[in-house]
Amino acid sequence: MTGSAAPDVLRAPLVVEFPFTRSLGPVQSAFLTGLRERVVLGVRGGDGRVVVPPVEYDPVTAEEIRELVEVAPTGTVTTWAWNPSPRRDQPLDRPFAWVLVKLDGADTSLLHALDAAGPESVHTGMRVRIRWAEERTGAITDIACFEPYEGGKGHQLTPHRGEFADAVTGIVAPARLDYTYSPGRAQSAYINALSARKTVGERCPSCRKVYVPPRGACPTCGVATVERVEVGPAGTVTTYCIVNIKARNLDIEVPYVYAHIALDGAGLALHGRIGGIPYDQVRMGLRVEPVWTEGGRYPDHYRPTGEPDADYETYKELI
């Protein structure tokens, strides 16, 4: 992690990314397949309103609904917000407006991008139409964006069976979250101390419990913690589990043991891997110490110290 404007608080860019796969019911399948064919479908609810994008259950009665109708590719902006700095994978790579558009024939609004020259050219009530993507696959991105439209209303709702050749039955949507994480003052001090091969917690001024890793406040008493206390380095195994499934991108052979370890002087246990002993010999009360690798910023694992096992009464409150 790297330092921020405040020298004692760390910050680091982090990315959470995974593919989200879902199957589609008959309504969503018809909607996305229709977009591929340049057809926009809505669904009629029990109160007669046409919902776009369509839903499978009535938002008022929660009953299943299936009556599909085709609406127009033109509509009216109901509200909007200007986006001056588009982010990765957004619909347009230049400034644009996020708009809610009530398509002609629909009673609800669809969220998408509007390609406009600037915020001065966007207003609630303006008429827009869909600009279709050149290559369409059966996804909401088949609507490339909306664009200004000078025409009026006049669309007649058309019942639709929702039947298409080669219907889309499932989608894979890549989910990605880019953000900057800061552990805060207390955990920044904890991480910096680990780089010096020390473990530092913070003591609650009320209950006197030492939290490792520190949280900046006592979750029991609700008061700030500022007194730093070095604990360990040795500790006691309070509970543990034997891992038999090899994790992807983790170069550790199974089986191995992951344990909760109450470092001497700490008021609660932290977790770490146990090494230097056969997995079936790890036990509650085992006394362990950290093992550091060259250049490591935290213990690689914990190994037995050779001391007698701790008495249960000394760690029963830390399980």
Image (spheres, rainbow, N blue to C red):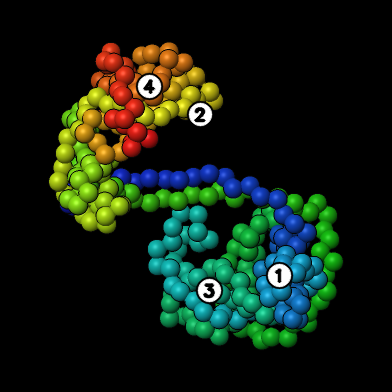
Q: Residue furthest front?
A: 313
Q: Which residue lies at the image location 49% right of the left edge and 19% below the top edge?
A: 255
Label 1: how many residues lie within 10 Å, few (<14), some (14-19) or many (20+)?
few
- Residue under label 4: 274
Instruction: Tell which circle, 2 or 4, labels the residue nearer the N-terminal end.
Output: 2
Q: Badge 1 is on which residue?
A: 62
Q: Which element is circle 2 on?
A: loop
| Residue 278 shown left or right of residue 40 in the figure | left
Q: Is residue 1 visible?
A: no
Q: Is 122 located above or below residue 163 in the figure?
A: below
Give the residue type that dot 1 points to: Ala
Q: How many marks?
A: 4
Q: Closer to us: mark 2 or mark 4?
A: 4
- Quadrant of res 292: top left
Residue 99's mark? 3
- Label 4 packing within 10 angstroms: few (<14), some (14-19), many (20+): many
In the displayed structure, 304 sits above or below 137; it is above
User: Residue 311 appears in which quarter of the rendering?
Assistant: top left
Mark 3 or mark 2, which has the lower sequence index?
Answer: 3
Residue 35 locus on image (x, y percent) = 71, 62
Q: Earlier in the sequence, mark 1 or mark 3?
A: 1
Q: Nearer the viewer, mark 1 or mark 2?
A: 1
